[in-house]
Image (cartoon, grey):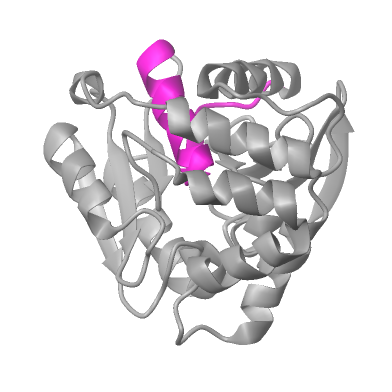
Amino acid sequence: MEQRTSNGIGFITGRWPLDPLKSTIVLIHGAGGSSFFWQAQVEALAERVNTVAIDLPGHGQSHGSGHDRIEDYALAVIDFIRTIKAPKPIPCGISLGGAVAQQLLLDYPDLFKAAIIISSGAKLKVAPDIFDAIEKDIKSYVELMANFAASKSTDPNRVKRFKDDAARCKPEVIIQDFKACDRFDVMPRVGSIRSPVLVVTAEDDQVTPPKYGDFMETSIAKASRVHITEAGHIVPMEKPEEVNRAIVEFLDQAGL
């Protein structure tokens, strides 16, 4: 795995330069996260496809500030994909990143032949208590979110990596992220997506319960669904082998 920057945007990659003959999975983290959330996917999938995990603006090693609109994050990802000349890009996002992936499919349908949406939904309303918690005590928020985001059966060491990542993000950026989620609603449009989409849900996800995946599965014509047990919202960290296997099977079936 290699850490790099391009035009002020940080990212990690399993191979550089990218193989022009392979598809490129562009991994997009959730609210308050960074590219390192995807370390297990970047490393394990690098032989199958190009793997690139982005730090969204204001996160990780990226310059600038965060955004309070999913559309703006989608534009940042488009600029990044074009800058690094990612061949045959496939967005793969979790939570906020899953919203970005949907926005990309809706706004740039000819650019993306497939997508992967994990622990996300076509509408992402945020409880007001979350904004209050961030503003009052960021450390308590991080602890609360980590406990809420993972299954009780998950190894605490894996949850610690999530907590450490969230603790490095500026509170004002996290607030912008959640404002972007709160404004996001493509429920009336998601049915127009025509590309193959892998929808991954987790049994113990309290943030975006499996019913969010139910809606996308029934609304998107070419949706495939994988439901993972004994895992929560941060399932790529909790069950990386199962998530990676689901992604490989999806790519194989889609011929990508």
x 71%, y 46%: residue: 135
Q: Nearer the viewer, residue 174 or 248?
A: 174
Q: Name which residue lies at 27% across and 35% down.
A: 196
Where residue 20 sits, quadrant-wise, is top right
Above or below: residue 198 compared with residue 249: above
Which residue is at a point 39% across and 38% down the rendered structure image?
125
| Extent of the magenta region | 85-107
Query: What residue is drawn where x is 77% and y is 66%?
Result: 164
In the image, residue 100 lies in the stretch drawn in magenta:
yes
Vertical placement of residue 233 versus 129, above or below: below
Q: Is residue 30 magenta?
A: no
Residue 98 falls in image quadrant: top left
For the N terminus, give its image quadrant: bottom right
Locate residue 193 relative to residue 165 in the image: left or right.
left
Q: Is residue 160 left or right of residue 147?
A: right
Residue situated in front as seen by the camera: 129 or 236: 129
- Examine the image and state in which quarter residue 204 appears: bottom left
